[in-house]
Amino acid sequence: MESVKRFAAPPLSSHDSKNDFLIGLRGFFVIQSFLHTFLLVFAPGSVVHSANAQEGSHSSSLHKALKFVSILFWNDGIIYSAFILLSARTICIPFMKDKTKLSVAGSIFRRGIRLWFPVAVALAISTGVLQSTGYKYIDDFAKATGNISILVPYKIDNALIYFNSVFNLFWVTTRFSDQAGSYAFPGQMMWVINVIYMQSFTVYMTMVIIPYTRRSWRVKGAFFFIITAWWVQSWAWYSITGLLLADMATNMDFKAKAQRGIKIWRSIRCPSYFAYAVILAAGLIMQYLWAAWRPEYRDDELIAHGGLYYTGGLNEDFDVKQPQARDDNYFVLLGFLLCVETSDIIQWALANPLFVYLGQRSLSWFLVQSILVYTMGIKLFQTLHMTSEVAATAACFFAILGATAVGSEVFYRAVEVPSHVLSYTTFDWIRD
């Protein structure tokens, strides 16, 4: 009984309560992720980068208005980029508090177990449910509603394919979305966990220099690293940005210095939030220009990188279907995170109990929401037979929201917490 109780309660968090705003920020993006997943299925014209929104000829006025708002609130590029950047910002915190080899080893070892088991269980659940219900109803739904933005999940036929699909999610280092594990999962967004896991090692390998180098050198080195990673179009420029923000916040008294303002000349200082607002505005302007004015130019920025994996020249033969580390998403997130790191009001707002609760269960929400939207949600929509499509969509929204809240809590308690405990138990066992 004691062993069962041990796996029912998570280990004490390594994060101080003063960092609750970071967990709350993750919860904020959980809400955006849910909206994006739901709307891509039931109102794809309102999702800015969806195929339906790009076609645009049949979009209603409501969809056009929602598409405009979606650049801020359910933009898939900003959402997955935020999770990658926030992961880098938070996973180094335990080492910042305890700069020992045991801390590094524990973080690296536990990371894989804490992610592998929830992913494996979620993929098994989605595969089992889709095998029992069949896959055809998703295609029928897409054709009936004119949704060209979603795909029927790839069918996993046997245990070997399933095992290889999960294994590759923690092994693939390029072309992250071109793998069975991501294609087989509803919504095809499982690749995000692949990137987060792989970029964890970039953070782990880089953070170990922090106790042994000067602060000014670390900042300069990080800028050089970010520029170099940008040039070769690696997600590392997001990861090192997150690590740099963590280092400045923890070791360089960044918040207090930023609140004093940026020194311009003698005693004249410019409020730091002005510079952060400029960075944020630059990203948003690019987002709106490429969404509403010149969408055909959106991918042109991707050429201005080194074609690292296939040529010595520029990145002229990129795959537009692959998720990309983009400049506009980066500037939006960098400007926003700088405001978050230095504002007491924003940190207080993000540390509210609801956002913190969602942030602590972000992985469970991410995994459960897609399964429910593509199974229960579509089935419910098909059986409602309402004359108003808006009413049917609203009914599905509230039903799926409630089911996701319950399902993610069950998944968190039954799968994510035991995985967390198992990672600690196993590491304690192998080092004793």
Image: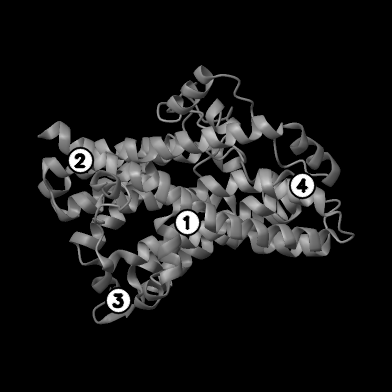
The image quadrant where one finds the C terminus is: top left
Residue drawn at the location 65% of the way across and 34% of the way down = 130
* Amino acid marked by disc 4: Asn
Is 205 situated left or right of 278 in this image?
A: left
Disc 1 to disc 4: CB gap under 8 Å: no
Residue denoted by label 2: 106
Residue 308 visible, this orientation: no
User: Closer to the camera: disc 4 or disc 2?
Assistant: 2
**Which sits in the foreground, 71 or 168?**
168
Distance in Å between CA atoms under marks 3 and 1? 21 Å
Distance in Å between CA atoms under marks 3 and 2? 35 Å
**Which sits in the foreground, 129 or 103?**
129
Residue denoted by label 4: 52
Dot 2, how many residues are within 10 Å of its Cα: few (below 14), some (14-19), or many (20+)?
Answer: some
Residue denoted by label 3: 259
Residue denoted by label 1: 331
Query: Which mark sits nearer the N-terminus, 1 or 4?
Result: 4
Rendering coords of residue 404 (x, y %): 57, 54
Query: Which mark sits nearer the N-terminus, 3 or 1?
Result: 3
